[in-house]
Image: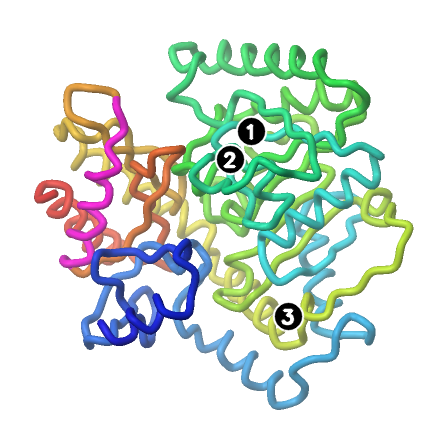
Amino acid sequence: MTDLYDRHRAVLPDWLALYYERPMELTHGEGRHVWGADGRKYLDFFGGILTTMTAHALPEVTKAVSEQAGRIIHSSTLYLNRPMVELAERIAALSGIPDARVFFTTSGTEANDAALLLATAHRRSNQILAMRNSYHGRSFTTVGITGNQSWSPTSLSPLQTLYVHGGVRSRGPYAGLSDAEFTAACVADLRDMLGQSRGGVAALIAEPVQGVGGFTSPPDGLYAAFREVLDEHGILWIADEVQTGWGRTGDHFWGWQAHAQHGPPDILTFAKGIGNGMSVGGVVARAEVMNSLDANSISTFGGSPVTMAAGLANLTYLLEHDLQGNARRVGGLLIERLRAICAQLPAVREVRGRGLMIGIELIEPGTDRPNPQAAAAVLEAAREGGLLIGKGGGHDTSVLRVAPPLSLTVAEAEEGAAILERALHSA
């Protein structure tokens, strides 16, 4: 592994982050497990950053990819593409957006970038509302709206971004308020922010559950309350479902459905889990918005026949096996188990999340200060115990991120919780 690590450092950017003091190579996977180059087996509770959504080496997806690759791998969007049309039809119907149109990309970053293009073109404005502590990708436009300095390497942007309160429930100036008071305060902040902006703001972009930010979220209904204000001004709502989509939260198929009192978003972005590891992202928008571009456009790799075949097979498996229901049931057991484990640990501030999207925030004992060193130590200890997890959390990376494939079994949840318990006690 040292040789591969040395080669990695010699040809790849210094800023390309790697987990662990001794970075590891994964050689293969099956179900909820992966194997390292050293031959050791690990229980995977991070799924390639929430991307291996159903299972590693899922036979239905593997077969669909293989069969499509044997016919034709690539054509571009300049030709009719049956798998792309079929997947678009299914996603449009599932999106909840009326008269929906779907545009496929190769990543969540590209999906959010396209959504920003649509919103700013439709509204003829480059002003964007974004949430504090947010993350939306690594392109020039998405970095410019990311409210998290750890993932925003430049302040330059083609957009004017105005940051709104509300994405983080348990920290910040409104943390001590009740849910209703918190929502009212955030709405008042939004109104105040709009009173300071000049011209028409294009859109609000928000993750229903902030991913990189540490799986934090507002009270249910906050974005519906925002929507009332946005509608007064004609401002679009973009729901970034790159991490929350496809039933991961258990309670809902989309994260926006926890805020559905005033209907679906104008634009929805997705990626990660739908391809189960294949490069699939996309944008769903009502036709009026999607069709507002007045210049030609194509996608060379978005909607590839192979990735579309994977997405179709993966979505079919997800729905036929009720993986949303499994995320709700097994995720509910797992989060309660983790809360019981952490209840007596002074280094744990909060266990939060829903479904199979769980965050454990670590602090310096006796304080409210984030403890990124402890998070790094638990990540290492979990690996030594045979469990792979992630980390994130605002500006400090002090949150352990637990997001297994949605087919996780009760026995695997118990096994992972036991390993994590030992890691938390040892770090």
Which numbered disc covers residue 193? Answer: none
Image quadrant holding the N terminus, namely: bottom left
Is the Cβ of the residue at disc 2 closer than 8 Å to that at disc 3?
Answer: no
- Helix, strand or loop: magenta stretch: helix
Query: Which of 120/185 is in front?
Result: 120
How far is disc 3 from disc 1 in space, using C-alphas?
31 Å
Task: Tell me residue 168's x, y (percent).
Answer: 45, 26
Q: Which residue is mark 2?
A: 134
64 vs 340: above or below:
below
On the question of residue 406 being in view, the answer is: no
Nearest to N terminus: mark 2 or mark 3: 2
Nearest to N terminus: mark 3 or mark 1: 1
Q: Bounds of the magenta span?
A: 369-385
Is the Cβ of the residue at disc 2 closer than 8 Å to that at disc 1?
Answer: yes
Q: Which residue is mark 1?
A: 131
Tell me where residue 221 sits by quadrant.
top right
Q: Which residue is mark 3?
A: 308
Which amino acid is tagged 1?
Met
**Secondary-structure class at tag 3:** helix
Which amino acid is tagged 2?
Ser
How far is disc 2 from disc 3 in space, using C-alphas?
29 Å
Residue extending furthest toward the left: 426
Query: Which of 141/170 is in front?
Result: 141
